[in-house]
Image: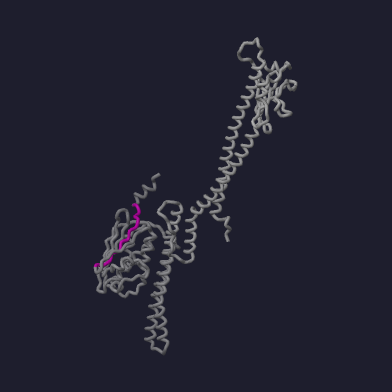
Amino acid sequence: MQLPFHSLRWRLQAWHGLILLLVIVALCGAVHRLATVHEFQRIDREVVAAERALVRGLIDAWRPADLPEGPLSPRFVFERIRAGDATVPSAVAARFSGTEPGHVYFVIRDADGKILLRSDNAPAGRVPTPSAASSEFSDNLRTVGRHRELHRATSDGVAVLVGRDISAEQDQMLRFTAWLAAVGLGVWLLGLLGGWWLAGRAIRPVDSISRTATRIAEGNLDERIDTADTDSELDQLGRVLNQTFDRLHDSFERQRRFTADAAHELRTPVSILLSETQRILRRERSAGEYHEALQTCHDTAGRMRRLVEALLLLARLENNSVAPRRERLDLAVVADDTARHLAPLAEERRVTIHTELSPAVCLGDPDALGILVTNLVANALQHHRPEGGSVWLRTQLESGRAVLVVRDDGPGIPGKNLPHIFERFHRADSARTGGSGHTGLGLAIAKTIADNHQGELAATSRPGEGATFTLSLPADAPDDTRAERDARP
């Protein structure tokens, strides 16, 4: 029993969920990072503005009366603070006071670490710790606990710390992080549900194909996979499987008909053998009667042998158990040999074989093509009128193909039988059978040989006007053309 987690749907869902989770985490992380950077940039601007307001407020409060209006260097402030007689102006103290969320504070110390000025709301133990300055001023923004601080120092060692409480922003960022995680989780869950639905729809044709294939494997060979008129991969797979099932169904049907027909054909001679032996064994017979009975059994056994040999040949041809040879041969030579070989049978049936043979070179198995031509000519002879007639053999090259035509002036093939003329054990009516006792496999064998040689074998006929069989095979190039082709780089 297959575990559900091993199914294709679960595997698709697992990969979809993993990829979706990675995408959501990356997206939420990027959004969180952008929001954090934006918030700290805003806070940093406020801290820098507070530091400038501190210096400006001290300059304005400590400006000497004899100095004209105008900007002063921050060094003036630090020298005043270093003198030790500076106090925090009330305006500055008012700005840097309170402990509500978002309040600002400052601390100023000298090079020896002595605290020179500080706001009343500055956290205890807060001391400026700037980096070593290589220029007149250096600064460093950092987050300490729930505060954002700017550390600035001069080249002579005076350091300033300006900080801002960021507890409200940190709490807001925590809430934003939780909200972002909740939204991401919700999107992921919705994505999982959507992926499960999509995976179900995606593999629904696979389930249909699997169920249909199972029913076909159980014996319902007439059922086929439903396919849409699209070029999707699954529809293409369904069409390919349907074609495969059609071929299997045709193969099983041919095998079933073949078995039934073979059993039917063999049943008659076996019945004759049994009835004849039972008849002759009922009582003592004369030598003539024994001879007559043995002759009947001999003829019946010969018919059975011909039938079995034809069945074995047809099975070997259809199963390709023996690869056909490919030799360069002339159909005219094969047809001429066949005409000479069947001349006694033609003479016995008072049929004249006329030949009109032009070179028709092709590649093929001489033995197999000999059987093919023999079956076509023998069929024309066996199915002729008792009063005799003529059979014509013609070979020629036509449009790059080697063509053999076998035509007779016999009774022809009835129109209802013509589509089935190459089927196994098919026989036309008595007008063409002539009581020959043939197996009904000759034309089927000929058609199979033609197919194995990538050829075409067709029959045309009109009742009372004879039958015509046309064999067309791929022609082989002449010697000079083949030499030129082989020498071509």
Residue 473 among magenta residues: yes
What secondary structure is the magenta-colored segment mainly? strand
Q: Which residues are magenta?
A: 465-477
- In the depicted view, which residue is nearer to us: 91 or 232? 91
**Residue 151: horizontal and vertical position, in percent?**
67, 25
- In the depicted view, which residue is nearer to us: 474 or 258? 258
Residue 197 among magenta residues: no
Q: Can the viewer see residue 316 in this picture?
A: no
Screen quadrant of the C terminus: top left
**Residue 390: horizontal and vertical position, in percent?**
25, 68
At a point 67% along the width and 33% down the height, the residue shown is 146
The quarter of the picture where residue 324 lies is bottom left
Query: In the rendered view, would you say 58 is above or below 361?
Result: above
In this rendering, the count of numbered labels is 0
Left or right, 46 with reference to 452:
right
Left or right, 416 with reference to 223:
left
At a point 65% along the width and 34% down the height, the residue shown is 167
Screen quadrant of the N terminus: bottom right
